[in-house]
Image: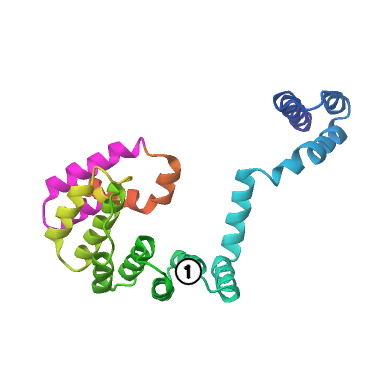
Amino acid sequence: MLWIFATIALQIACIVHVFRTGRNTAWIMAIAFLPMIGMLAYFIVEIMPNLSRDRRVKQVKANIADSMDPDRHVRDARDALEFSDTVGNRLAFGDALMARERYEQALYQFREAQRVSPHNDRAIGMRIAEAAYEAGLSDDALAALDGLPETNSASERDRRDLLRAKVAEIDGRSADALALYRGIVDRVPGDEVRCRIAALLIAAGDRAGARTVLKEVEIRKRRTPPAMLKANADMYDWAKRMLAELG
């Protein structure tokens, strides 16, 4: 009995798909009167060829490949660099190394890209600053930030101030970090800055201030896209846990 209901459900799904996608209605007769053969043929002829072009399917395949071989992007980028030593290929190699948290190696590639670049490139300089920060080289990160050319982009200035604040935080200059974070908190997307402010306030003993910030994070979380929630799951779990502890 269950098999019959499952077959009927699949037939209905296939027929609905025929109508929605504008397929040849002759498929309806095949699906209705030759259920298993008709549905199998429909899947092979009409659905399977389109799966290779579906963005979501491509992403799933890429995720599976990445989980099975996490260093494949690094190898591909290294091979491209060995074939053609260009600024773009060095940056791509450095980006791949950053994604694998190999920060010192990435920093070397970014510096080599800067060395051969014909001008003081903001994008390269920012990569150097970020890689240096992640590698724990705060002085190098600040030097790279100080060497960046001026920009008229407000978002780029905020990105630089965010990194300056992070450097100040790991250097123990909490007051400087807090001032920088508060200056950009309403402009930087996401809730990383708010969580960092809360952590600094907790460390300083300002439980009430931290509670206020974390309550705002919880309210904003309800309107945050699922993809962003998933990408920052550890951060939001921390915020929820800290808010519960603060009462």
Q: Which corner quadrant holds the N terminus?
A: top right
Residue at 60%, 50% in the rendered image: 60
Amino acid tagged 1 = Val
Residue of label 1: 87
Q: Is residue 222 magenta?
A: yes
Q: Is residue 247 visible?
A: no
- The magenta span reads 195-223
Q: Is residue 206 visible?
A: yes
Q: Percent x, y for residue 32? A: 84, 24
Q: Percent x, y for residue 59? A: 59, 50
- Please tell me in which quadrant of the rendered image residue 173 appears: bottom left
* Callout count: 1
- In the image, residue 10 sits, relative to residue 154, either above or below, namely above
How are the colours assigned in the image?
rainbow
Q: Is residue 180 left or right of residue 127?
A: left
- Please tell me in which quadrant of the rendered image residue 65 appears: bottom right
**How many residues crowd mark 1 within 10 Å: few (<14), some (14–19), many (20+)?**
many
Q: Is residue 205 left or right of residue 59?
A: left
Q: Is residue 91 left or right of residue 204?
A: right
Between 76 and 240, the residue placed more toward the observer is: 76
Q: Is residue 32 magenta?
A: no
User: Is label 1 in a helix, a strand or a loop?
Assistant: helix
Q: Is residue 147 left or right of residue 179?
A: right
Residue at 59%, 66% in the rendered image: 69
Residue at 11%, 51% in the rendered image: 206
Residue at 24%, 56% in the rendered image: 161
Q: Which corner quadrant holds the C terminus?
A: top left
